[in-house]
Image (tube, grey):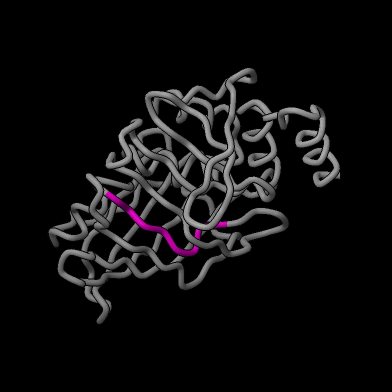
Amino acid sequence: MRFLVLMIFFFASPANAYLPPAGFVLGHAVTDRAGLKSLEWTAKVTDLKNRAAFKEVLRLDFISGKISASYQSPTDEALGGIQGPISLLNKLGRFWLCVSLDPNIARVKAALETLRVLPGETEETRLERVGNQIAWMWGVDALIGFEKDEFTPLIYRENADPKADAIIFQGFAIAAANSKVPRNVLVRVKDEDLFSFELKSIKTDSPAIKEKISIAAPQLPSVKEWISLVR
């Protein structure tokens, strides 16, 4: 059915392919993860400036709208952590952990408005290449892109400047049903690749986050910078 809809988009006009509005693309993306209630992952994060690596154990509770994350060294030494609402994530984190994963469409639209990307039904999309993939793109002040056929998120860039801060998804893992989670992620600041993220394991049946977890404030510079950018 999805293939048929896309074929109609491309061949509706003999002169120009029909480009679906942003609301259509966003609606498909959120529908594909509608049954997702929680995520928990373990990942390796590498600071590309100094090759320092650390582990992130992150939990997303989409029912309560909360996130918690703890960090460890490669030898499992505790490096601190964070906890708070998804709605207060830092700039690139709002795209990564809300727009790209949250099944709550109201939170997704609110996050897009905060990121200065219109989520409206009539906002025009355009086809652009992201790496070796073709994406539905939209936005003026800031830019967002979803893969053309699978409707998976590919990129968010903070403004129209190609050298602006950006987060780029380079591969995905299956979480549950049709939902996909970014497996390899690149965080770019001022046209410099600063961090790489590699997903190691994931599960979708974690207990709800009900109480505030006592976590020490991160001290390692790489962890503090990572949190300031994407958490």
Number of disc labels: 0
In the displayed structure, 145 sits above or below 58; it is above
Percent position of residue 44, x then y: 35, 70
The residue depicted at 42 percent of the width and 24 percent of the height is: 140
Position in image of residue 115 (x %, y %): 39, 29
Q: Residue furthest bottom?
A: 75
Q: Position of residue 21 (x, y in %)?
A: 65, 26
Residue ID at (52%, 47%): 129
Q: Residue furthest front?
A: 15
In this picture, is 58 found above or below 44? above
Horizontally, is 9 left or right of 159 in the view?
right
Return the residue nearer the eye: 145 or 90: 145
| Quadrant the N terminus occupies | top right
Where residue 103 appears, as percent x and y from the top left, is 61, 40
Asked if the stretch drawn in magenta spans residue 144, the answer is no
What segment carries the magenta color? 181-188
Vertical position of residue 67 compared to residue 27: above or below: below
Q: Is residue 215 above or below residue 19?
A: below
Q: Provide the major secondary structure of the magenta segment.
A: strand
In-image side of 174 versus 211 (left or right): right
Magenta run includes residue 182: yes
Residue at 63% across, 18% down: 122
Q: Is residue 34 left or right of residue 79?
A: right
Residue name at image x 77 percent, y 33 percent: 9
